[in-house]
Image (tube, rainbow, N blue to C red):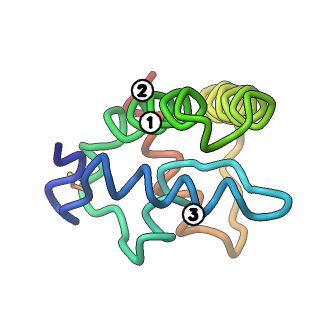
Amino acid sequence: MIVCSCTEISDRDIESALLEILRAPDAPIPTPGLVYRHLAKRMNCCSCAPLAVETIYNKVDALEKKGLISPTLSATTRSKLLEFTSRRSSPRVLSRNSDSETQTSDDAVVRKIA
Ligand code: FES
């Protein structure tokens, strides 16, 4: 299934990226922006953001059920994602840091989910 028509990212692409991302030591939170960058892609219109988040959640569950990631890692990842999306959806002051690309695409995700 195609998740992002702009970049032609499929659910299988996301699953493969998640496997690589989550197996890394000190695995980062697999936000859509991080997953897309891992696939050497960049969000364009961001209309896929809600589906990308849903796909990431579902794929983390599926990877756990297949035994490809541990239940602990799966639970930790879901918790981090939930915390991340909650934190991002609360009102905040706009910052002007140098990580603007990451922040822009992930902020867009939260705006579309909210
Ligand atoms: S549909 Fe994914 S960036 Fe446009």
Label 2 sits on residue: 113
**Amino acid at pointer 3:** Thr
Quadrant including the N terminus: top left
Label 1 sits on residue: 53
Whether label 1 touches label 3, CB < 8 Å:
no
Q: Secondary structure at mark 2?
A: helix
Q: Residues within 10 Å of mark 1 (few under 14, many from 20)?
A: many
Indicate which quadrant contains ligand 1.
Answer: bottom left
Whether label 2 touches label 3, CB < 8 Å:
no
In this view, 89 is above or below 18? above
At a point 48% along the width and 50% down the height, the residue shown is 32
Q: Secondary structure at mark 3?
A: helix
Q: Earlier in the sequence, mark 1 or mark 3?
A: 1
**Amino acid at pointer 2:** Ile
Q: Which mark is nearer the camera, 2 or 1? A: 1
Q: Earlier in the sequence, mark 2 or mark 1?
A: 1
* Residue 71 placement (x, y as % from top left): 73, 28
* Residue 95 placement (x, y as % from top left): 71, 57
**Amino acid at pointer 1:** Val
At a point 41% along the width and 29% down the height, the residue shown is 54
Count of number-bearing discs: 3
Label 3 sits on residue: 102
In this view, 11 is above or below 53? below
Mark 2 → mark 3, Cα distance in angstroms: 17 Å
Q: Earlier in the sequence, mark 2 or mark 3?
A: 3
Q: Residues within 10 Å of mark 3 (few under 14, many from 20)?
A: some
Mark 2 → mark 1, Cα distance in angstroms: 9 Å
Q: Nearer the viewer, residue 66 or 79?
A: 66
